[in-house]
Image: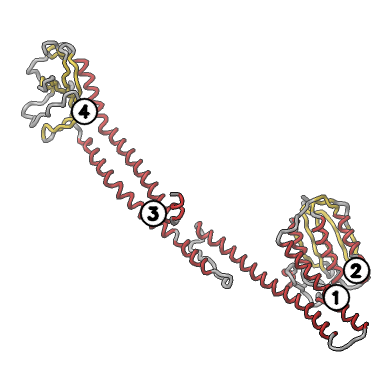
Amino acid sequence: MKTWWRRRTLRFRLAAWYGVGGTLLLAAFSATLYSYVAETMARPLDSELQQDLAEIRLRLAITAEGELRWNRAAVADEAHWNSENPWFELWNEQGELVRRFWPFTETRIESVPLKPEPGRERISIFSVARDLRLRVLSVPYAVPDRGETWMIRVMTVHRPMADGLGALRLIIVVALPVVVALLVLGGYALTRRWLKPLDLMVAEANRITMDDLGRRLPVVNPHDELGRLAGVFNVTLDRLEESFVALDRFVADASHELRTPLTTLRSVGEVGLRRSRTVEEYREIIGSMLEEAQRLQLLTQRLLELASTEGGAPAVQHTPVRLDELVRRCVGELGILAENKNQRVLVEAPECTAHTDPILLRQAVQNLVDNAIKYSPAGTTIQVKVRETGDHWVIEVTDEGPGISVEHRSRLTARFFRPDSGRDRGRGGFGLGLALTKAYLRLLGGTVEYAPAPGGGSTFRLTLPRV
């Protein structure tokens, strides 16, 4: 049953729940209404009959000879019955009417009630005239002095409003199925209309393929739940399309970068094989090929590092790290490169400790210092500073290079992006250093930012959370 239910459509299940819930609510409402009406209309009459019966038992007495006494006084055969007293009939065991006590004359009455069924208590309604109906309570009545059980029938005027109970019951029985059917059909129609945008979304989603990622789900009403859901999916599709575009661009750029050293290797090899050469010439050719092979190996390594970092593969180990020592160690390892260009690298780092991953942070700092040395003119000064700002540690690397033009700053951390002609392959750049730095800082919970340095040059800023 559970499996069958799950296979039904959402609109079917909504309509079913709507119909079942509506049926239960209507049934409860009808039962409550009928009970209330019965309590307010019919029950007072029955309660009045019971009170009259109790009064009759208290005031009526029947002697062994069959004489009737009311309030211990004999009742004359022709006595007129006071309307303020209870109305009742007495029937003996033989089903014969003993006496009828009511204030009506024979001319007023068109027909009299039939005799009661012996030994059975029940409530009946009799019409004794065209404008007079009586509500009657028949109960067994013990006559101790005679050792018999008679029937006593207490009567009162049946009020017309009590007749509405039967009509109300009939209305409820007939109208309830009709109302339930209308509820189910109306619920199905409403859910079909409300869920129509979902059908449109499904149809449009089926048309989205890898070759057609530009399609978006229709948003009929951006303010309801389905509209907001479609909006969220469209944002997700935008990101997915951007990811595919970035992936295509990455593959194209990687292919281009790999093709260059491979083409160089092949060209150098082909040139070397065209004629016989001396040992020194072969050494030079092989050196050129090894240089390109090393470059190819370095590019492949950088691509693997970037893919590993962006995929979240590296395990980040947050440990206490002396930032001043880490920065000085990175500068010391790259000092030989600065000496070759007669550059000075100044470090301003007070003693401080951060909780971060030393390996990833070291790679990020090395990338920035290496870029500063590589792209700064000879004889310039590079400054590396460590300072505290609120809840963050900041590491700044400032060079005196050509800087970054405004139109290129937004793409600095993109893969294979080299903004200026000076940053070419001949100087060892692949355009991956800042992309890797950004990936490292993302794993460490920090950011990498660029700002133009006063007087020219560039300032790259690494921001790390203190905790």
In the rendered image, residue 377, in percent from the top left (x then y), is placed at: 88, 73
Q: CA distance from mark 2 to mark 3?
A: 77 Å
Amino acid type at image mark 3: Gly
Q: Which type of secondary structure does the marked residue at label 3 adopt?
A: helix
In the rendered image, residue 431, in percent from the top left (x then y), is placed at: 77, 71
Q: Is residue 341 above or below residue 157?
A: below
Q: Nearer the viewer, mark 3 or mark 1?
A: 1
Amino acid type at image mark 1: Glu
User: Are the two marked residues, 4 and 1, in contact with CB atoms closer than 8 angstroms?
Assistant: no
| Mark 2 nearby-residue class (10 Å; few <14, some 14–19, many ≥20) | some
Q: Looking at the image, which residue is at 13% across and 14% down?
A: 68
Q: Which quadrant of the figure has residue 325?
A: bottom right
Q: CA distance from mark 2 to mark 1?
A: 18 Å
Tell which circle, 4 or 3, labels the residue nearer the N-terminal end. 4
Q: Which quadrant of the figure has residue 458?
A: bottom right
Q: Nearer the viewer, residue 359 or 217?
A: 359
Tell which circle, 2 or 4, labels the residue nearer the N-terminal end. 4
Q: Which mark is residue 187?
A: 3
Q: Which residue is mark 2?
A: 337
Q: Which residue is mark 1?
A: 291
Q: In this rendering, would 266 be left or right of 2? A: right
